[in-house]
Amino acid sequence: MNMKILKTDSRTIFLLLGYGLVLLIWLSLEDNGVLSVALLGTGAATLFTMIWLLKRIGGQVIALRVWFFGLLGLGAAIGALSTLITTLLMFFKTGWHGHGFADYPPTMILAMLQRMPIWTLAGLLVGLASAMIRLSISGHAAPDVKRASPNI
């Protein structure tokens, strides 16, 4: 079975503008928690990866097997990009505020980079879960496996 990838439309620009607005609000706050910046980094990685994908292969029909492994790769890419974008956001906010103390100390920024393998694995597992859910919704199971019939 084949599946069709959606195309980008005018809603894409509104998603980017909404994300930019949230990012500007976050930059103005005196927030130095890791959760907020990690969520913003993961959101940016997801948004940018999906927009890149839809612009590159939007409207094309893709085989189910390619779709399955593509979701695994996308999940891993989003996981890896999440740590990079989160690190860049931490670095940017630290430089933007210019206090006597850093919002995110260099040790915290480096600790975020050290988590890249774990975040990549987590993204891969989310991609696997998404692919399996998509397979179950489409009504196609894994390739047929010949079962031994009991000849008793």
Image: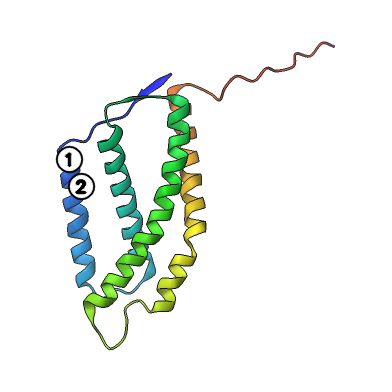
Say which quarter of the image contains residue 21.
Answer: bottom left
Q: Name the residue beneath numbered marker 2.
A: 15
| Front residue (pair 119, 140) | 119
**Label 1 with label 2: CB-CB less than 8 Å:** yes
Real-space Cα separation, disc 1 to disc 2, in angstroms: 6 Å
Three-letter amino acid code at the position of disc 2: Leu
Residue 133, above or below 95:
above
Residue furthest right in the image: 152
Name the spot of residue 26 as percent of width and height, x first: 23, 66
Name the spot of residue 120 as percent of width and height, x first: 48, 53
Left or right: 144 in relation to 129 = right
Name the spot of residue 121 as percent of width and height, x first: 51, 51
Identify the disc placed on residue 130: none
Three-letter amino acid code at the position of disc 1: Arg
Residue 44, above or below 49:
below
Crowding at dot 1, Cα within 10 Å, few <14 / some 14-19 / many 20+, comes out as few
Left or right: 30 in relation to 83 = left
Crowding at dot 2, Cα within 10 Å, few <14 / some 14-19 / many 20+, comes out as few
Residue 35, above or below 64:
below
Say which quarter of the image contains residue 107.
Answer: bottom left
Residue furthest front in the image: 56
Left or right: 65 in relation to 47 = right
Q: Name the residue beneath numbered marker 1.
A: 11
From the image, which quarter does the C terminus lie in?
Answer: top right
Name the spot of residue 1 as percent of width and height, x first: 43, 18
| Front residue (pair 23, 107) | 107
User: Circle 1 sits in a helix, a strand or a loop, which is it?
Assistant: helix
Residue 18, above or below 101:
above
Residue furthest bottom in the image: 100
User: Circle 2 sits in a helix, a strand or a loop, which is it?
Assistant: helix
